[in-house]
Amino acid sequence: MIVIAVAAGEATMRRRMTSLMVLAAMLAGCGKAAEDTPGDPQQLPDVALTAAPGVAFTYRYAFRLPFDRVAAAQEAHAQACERLGTARCRITGMQYRVLGEKRIEGMLSFRLAPDIARRFGKAAEGEVRTAGGALVDAEITGTDAGRDIAALTAQRRSDAAAMKQVEADLAGTDGKAGDRIDLQERRAELQRHRAAADAAIADRRDSLAATPMTFTYASGGGIGTFDTSAPFASAVGLARDSVVLTITIALGLLGLAGPPVLLGLLLWWLGRRFVPPAPQRPSDG
C-alpha cells in the first residue's frame, strides 16, 4: 500500500510539473521578444575563427544589463584593456548616456592586437553574464586586406611604368605646347593615382596590424525565453513580464482614452448645471 501511495504521489507531482511547464510555455508565447531565438540567447556561439593571413576582422558586441550595472561593466572592460598595455589594446572611444529613469546606454571602442581580439571579446561577454546581463547581438566581419594590398601594389607598378614613359615623352617633345600640356596632365593624373594607392595600402596594412572592436551597452533585462534548466524560475519571470506588459498597455490605453472621457463628463455636468431642462408638455388628460 505504501508503494502504491508513493507512486501515486509521484504521478501527481509529474502532472503538476507538466502543467506548470505548459503554463510557462504559454506565457513565453505571449511575452517573449520578437528577436527570440532557440538556444541560450546570452551565450556567444562558439564559432572558431581561423586566423586567416591577410584578413582583417572587425568585431561588434551589444550587451544588455540591469541599469545599475552598466557603468560597472563598462569600467571592467576598460580596465581589462588597460591591463594589456597600449601595445596590445587601446581605447579609442567611450560614451555613457542617461536617457531617463533606469534607461542607460554606453559604448566602448578598442583597437586590439589581432591575435587576442577573439579571446578579449569572449572574456568580456563572460563578465557581462556574471553581472546578470546578456549578449544580445554579435557581429564579426572580415575584409581580405591582403588581396587588396596585392592589387593596389600591382596597380602602382603599372602607374610607375606609365609615369616613366610620360617623363620620356616630355623630354623628347620638340616644344609643341599642345603635346606638353597633354603629357603634363597625364603626369599629374598618375601622381594622384600613386598618392591614392599609397594611402589605401597604408590603410589596409593598419587594419591588419590592429583589430577594431566595439561594445555597446543598454539597460534592460535579458531576452524573455523559457529556460528548461530552471522551469519554475522562468515561469515566474515570464509571468512577471506578462503582468508588467499588461499593466503598461492598460495605462497607455487609459492615457489615450482618459482625456476624451473626462471632456465628455465635463460637458455632461455643464449641461445639467446650466442648461435648463426642456419644458414638459401638458398631458391631454
Image (cartoon, rainbow, N blue to C red):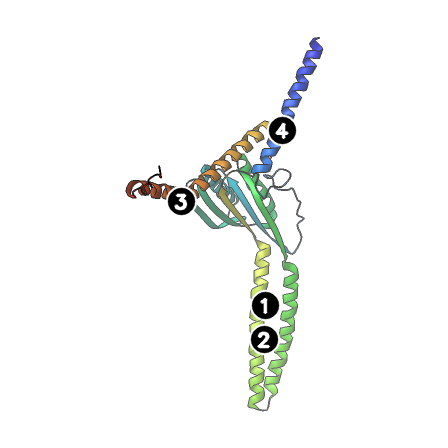
- Residue type at mark 4: give it: Met
Q: Earlier in the sequence, mark 1 or mark 2?
A: 2
Asked whether disc 3 touches disc 4, contact meaning CB atoms under 8 Å apart, the reply is no
Q: Are marks 3 and 2 in contact (CB under 8 Å)?
A: no
Residue at the disc numbered 4: 21
First in sequence: mark 1 vs mark 4: 4
Q: Residues within 10 Å of mark 4 (few under 14, many from 20)?
A: some
Mark nearer the N terminus (1 vs 3) = 1
Residue located 61% across and 77% down the image: 163
Mark carried by residue 227: none
SS assignment at label 1? helix
Is residue 105 left or right of 30 when viewed as pictured?
left
Confirm or deny contact between disc 1 and disc 3 (CB under 8 A).
Answer: no
What residue is disc 1 on?
A: 197
User: Which residue position is annotated with label 3?
Assistant: 260
**Dot 3 amino acid type:** Pro
Question: Which of 263 and 198 lies nearest the eye of the viewer?
Answer: 263
SS of the residue at dot 4? helix
